[in-house]
Amino acid sequence: MIMLSGQLPAILCAAALALTCSSCDNNTPDARHWLPADAVTPFMNQDEPDRLNEMTRIAAHGDPELVFFGDSITQEWLTQGNEVWDRFYGARHAANFGIGMAETGNLLWRIRAGYFDTIHPRLIVLMIGTNNTQYSRHTPQQIADGINLVAQELLTRLPGTKILLLGIFPRGMTVDDAYRANNKVVNRLIARTGDDKQVFYRDIGSAILAEDGSIRRELMSGPVHLNKQGYLQWAKAIEDDIVQLLGE
């Protein structure tokens, strides 16, 4: 896996200071406990320093062609899904930019802080939003606005990059789960973001669902996170798109 260049700590420190506001002290260990009322305000995740250190350590290996960007569901490719990651992405010069508990605002913070300023991936696989539903109780429209802004800011900084925008995975083990209902509406809204030119929207949630709409328990390590078999289903569901979008 590949991460970012060694100059990032200075960039991130400056950005963190610039984004500190009267209602949030980003220098405290529990910066994540402050959450904006909307889904388009950047904020720093409390685990950001640890993830940054990891990314900086791997930076020297070069510029990634493929980046996965999201929350803990993305980050856990490195734990629950590590064998699947190595099989599908180990030879593809891939980087994992997932971070636990992230919302759309945290991804915006990371973009503006410089995470993508020194790399030029050909493809970004983006999934974000389920924590907006759980932690901040944002409405579907608020979350969709946040996701759209993340995509726009990525394309502004990386005009030659394509984005594979994934619908939020179904959450909750049953079809009547309130969080799942919220995410389902978000997916309908962000489907409009795909233009099949730079942003390619795909809803692959059916890959982890049984015929009755319940989540397949054999694919999950809990009501939200996947296990190894779940990550295998994810990889298979997007493989054709990755092959095409990377021009393989």
Image (spheres, grey):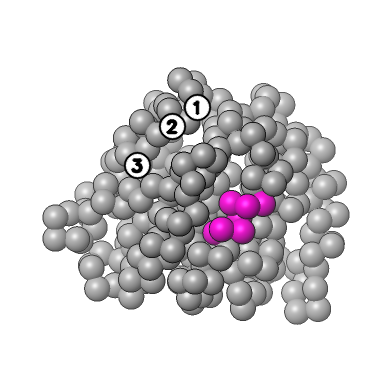
Q: Which type of secondary structure does the marked residue at label 3 adopt?
A: helix
For image coordinates 35% across by 51% down, the residue present is 203
Q: Earlier in the sequence, mark 3 or mark 1?
A: 3
Q: Which part of the image, by quadrant, shows the C terminus?
A: top left
Residue 122 versus residue 98 in the image, above or below: above
The amino acid sitting under disc 2 is Ile
Question: Which amino acid, by three-letter code, is at mark 3?
Answer: Trp
Q: Which mark, by number, is residue 234?
A: 3
Local SS, label 1: loop
Q: Judge by depth and name the residue closer to the eye, 170 or 2.
A: 170
- Say if mark 1 contacts mark 2, CB within 8 Å: yes
Q: Nearer the viewer, mark 3 or mark 2?
A: 2
User: Mark 1 Cα within 10 Å, few/some/many (few <14, many 20+)?
Assistant: some
Q: Is residue 61 left or right of residue 189?
A: right
Residues packed near mark 2 inside 10 Å, few (<14), some (14 to 19) or many (20 plus): some
Measured in 3D between alpha carbons, the distance from the residue under mark 3 to the one under mark 1, in whole angstroms, is: 17 Å
Q: Position of residue 77 (x, y in %)?
A: 45, 41
Query: Residue beneath label 2, please?
Result: 242
Residue 63 in the image, given as x and y percentages of width and height:
66, 27
Residue at (22% x, 49% y) in the render: 218
Q: Position of residue 27 (x, y in %)?
A: 79, 65
Residue 102 in view (yes/no)? no
Query: Residue at image x 55%, y 46%?
Result: 69
Q: Which residue is mark 1?
A: 246
Sequence-first tag of 3 and 2: 3
Looking at the rendered structure, the number of numbered marks drawn on it comes to 3
Task: Please give the range of residues in magenta.
Answer: 147-153
